[in-house]
Image: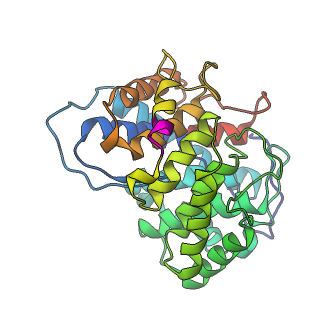
């Protein structure tokens, strides 16, 4: 039985989903297979427009690594509500987002098992009632994790677009933006984790949701966020990676992004292919995943694809036998919630 980290919300179960390692594994693979086909990638949602390329053959271990990871997350996401009588941000936010993106056939074949989750994702007014003793949850974290899952569910046509749901989600995100332009899960400036993100990554993920609605309000909020990150001079790996993704999400002119940021991220890659929380630190799966997302978003301007290939190899090597990845936790210690989000 998994640890019960959520409160009951009426009679509805609520679950938690997280997506980063699997998402990066697939993203980095596509980047190496299709180097001439740019695709839009930002903060966990990847819009792909790809065609086959004979330049690089598909690695034989890709299907095993990705498939075993998806099977693991699918089991955890579907089992959570029945075992805990609630929904979880990590299992049904981050993990569900990955499954909606990559597991179309499997999800569609088990539609009845997903109906409760889809109903939950359609009710943003309930999301901030979530609670956890494992990861510090905040209304912003719930909005982003469930919000991104609902965006992908609509995109993949698992649920119909709901203008009322979207309006509530966007309004609450706009209201939670700091006057300086960023979004934050935690008030203090701590190094981000799979459960707390840090300000730059929280901001990048919030912008992914705002991008689904074009309005003067969302445009102004996005530009304020871009201005903030460009003046923030991030140093931690995930902060630097998120800073690289934000202008890309806004489809800014490439010259708006300091090339030095991309170079710094490449230079901080370890010999193992992964990234640590800071340069010259032991590599972690979560930091490596976010770094790969950032570099994949800048693929057309990368001098070569070797950082993506090495990072992908690091993730495959780090994968556990069950299909998941060891969690990155800050402070250190076991955390089921961050285990799911790290794997996703």
> Does residue 221 appear in this view?
yes
Nearest the viewer among 301 and 162 is: 301
Position above or below: 277 against 71: above
Location of the N terminus (image quadrant): top right
Position above or below: 86 against 324: below
Bounds of the magenta segment: 258-262
How far across and how far down the image is residue 236, in percent? 65, 35
How far across and how far down the image is residue 114, in percent? 55, 62
Location of the C terminus (image quadrant): top right
Furthest residue to the top? 271
How far across and how far down the image is residue 135, in percent? 79, 45
Q: Residue at x 58, y 74 (%)?
A: 220
State the scheme by which the image is colored: rainbow
- In the drawing, does residue 228 fall left or right of residue 40? right
Furthest residue to the left? 54
Position above or below: 40 against 332: below
Main SS, magenta residues: helix
Picture quadrant where residue 322 is located:
top right
Nearest the viewer among 96 and 297 is: 297
Q: Residue at x 70, y 41 (%)?
A: 192
Nearest the viewer among 96 and 186 is: 186
Q: Residue at x 73, y 73 (%)?
A: 175
> Does residue 74 appear in this view?
no
- In the drawing, does residue 209 fall left or right of residue 7? left
Q: Residue at x 43, y 60 (%)?
A: 252
């Amino acid at each position: 039985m998994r640890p019960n980290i959520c409160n009951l919300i009426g009679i509805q179960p609520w679950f938690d989903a997280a997506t980063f390692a699997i998402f990066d594994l697939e993203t980095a693979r596509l980047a190496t297979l299709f180097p001439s086909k740019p695709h839009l990638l930002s903060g966990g949602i990847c819009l792909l427009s790809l065609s086959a390329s004979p330049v690089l053959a598909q690695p034989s271990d890709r299907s095993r690594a990705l498939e075993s990871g998806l099977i693991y997350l699918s089991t955890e996401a579907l089992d959570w509500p029945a075992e805990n009588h609630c929904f979880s941000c990590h299992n049904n936010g981050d993990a569900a987002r990955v499954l909606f993106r990559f597991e179309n056939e499997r999800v569609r074949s088990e539609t009845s098992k997903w109906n409760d989750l889809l109903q939950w994702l359609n009710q943003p007014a309930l999301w901030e009632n979530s609670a956890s003793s494992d990861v510090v949850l905040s209304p912003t974290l719930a909005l982003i994790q469930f919000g991104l899952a609902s965006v992908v569910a609509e995109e993949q046509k698992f649920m119909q677009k709901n203008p009322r749901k979207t309006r509530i989600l966007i309004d609450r995100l706009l209201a939670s933006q700091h006057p300086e332009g960023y979004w934050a899960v935690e008030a203090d400036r701590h190094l981000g984790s799979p459960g707390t993100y840090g300000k730059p990554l929280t901001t990048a993920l919030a912008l992914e949701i705002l991008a689904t609605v074009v309005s003067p309000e969302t445009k102004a909020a996005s530009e304020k966020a871009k201005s903030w990150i460009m003046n923030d001079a991030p140093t931690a790996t995930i902060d630097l990676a998120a800073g690289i993704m934000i202008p890309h999400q806004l489809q800014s002119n490439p010259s708006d992004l300091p090339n030095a940021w991309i170079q710094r991220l490449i230079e901080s890659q370890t010999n193992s292919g992964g990234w640590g929380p800071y340069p010259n630190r032991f590599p972690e799966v979560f930091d490596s995943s976010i770094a790969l997302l950032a570099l994949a978003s800048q693929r057309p301007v990368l001098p070569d694809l070797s950082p993506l290939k090495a990072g992908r190899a690091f993730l495959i090597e780090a994968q556990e036998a069950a299909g998941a990845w060891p969690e990155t936790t800050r402070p250190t210690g076991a955390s089921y919630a961050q285990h799911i989000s790290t794997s996703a």
